[in-house]
Image: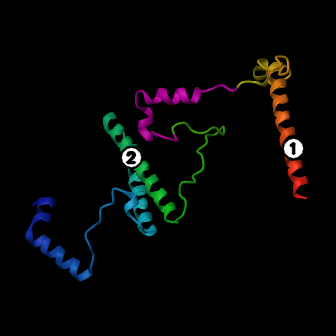
Amino acid sequence: MARNEEKAQSMLYRFREAQNAELTKITKKQRRPAMASSVSNVGECERWRRQIVREISRGVSKIQDSSMSDYQVRDLNDYINKMFREKYQWERRIKELGGPNYSMAPKMLDNEGREVPGVRGYRYFGRARDLPGVRELFEQEASGPVARSKTELYKNIDADYYGYRDEEDGALLESEREYEAKLLERLSQQQQTEVNDE
């Protein structure tokens, strides 16, 4: 039995495909354009976006496979992130053409109401979260900045913060005098022009 690739190259197969295309007017399967800006139809953009979403969901389900090596998991995770970037390009193009705004996604929150680490930017899916080096990254992000109490925040605040000693050096008073003189001069000029106009 011949392989599928060999069957596709045979003259009979190509003839039957051309004959079938003529009868049903079905063109060959189109490839997704490399640049989203080359498409000027919202429906076509949404079609390509749906195709990317299907590829992402297939990749996310495939990355759960425990028989894959770490290198394959990393490659698949990179591919999924690449598809997310491409999906963003198509969503932006759809919005430019007047279609719906798909980029208004809600924030992903955990049980305690904090934003889940690794959601913005580069993402890790399935087994990729358990790879060496990635697990430590999530632990660092989770520990992150510690919330400070009100007493710690107020500990370093003194009178300078509230502006109580601004007039002691005299610089502020001098600048206020200069600005006040300019305002008085401008006001007197406006009054003179009003008197002259009457």
Q: Residue at x 82, y 24 (%)?
A: 174
Left or right: 74 in relation to 121: left
Q: Is residue 51 visible?
A: no
Is residue 155 among the parts visible in the rendering?
Answer: yes
- The relative height of residue 195 versus residue 123 in the rendered view (above or below) is below
SS for tag 2?
A: helix
Estimate the spatial distance between the alpha carbons at disc 2 and disc 1, rounded to whole Å.
63 Å
Mark 1 Cα-neighbour bin, 10 Å: few <14, some 14–19, many ≥20: few
Residue 184 is inside the magenta segment: no
Q: Earlier in the sequence, mark 2 or mark 1?
A: 2
Tag on residue 82? 2
Instruction: Find out whether residue 146 is within the magenta segment.
Output: yes
Please state the extent of the stretch shown in magenta in the rendering: 119-147
Where is residue 110? Give x, y as percent: 61, 40
Q: Amino acid at mark 1?
A: Leu
Q: Residue 180 or 7: which is nearer the viewer?
A: 180
Q: Horizontally, is 172 left or right of 133 in the view?
A: right
Q: Position of residue 194 (x, y in %)?
A: 88, 53
Q: How many numbered callouts?
A: 2
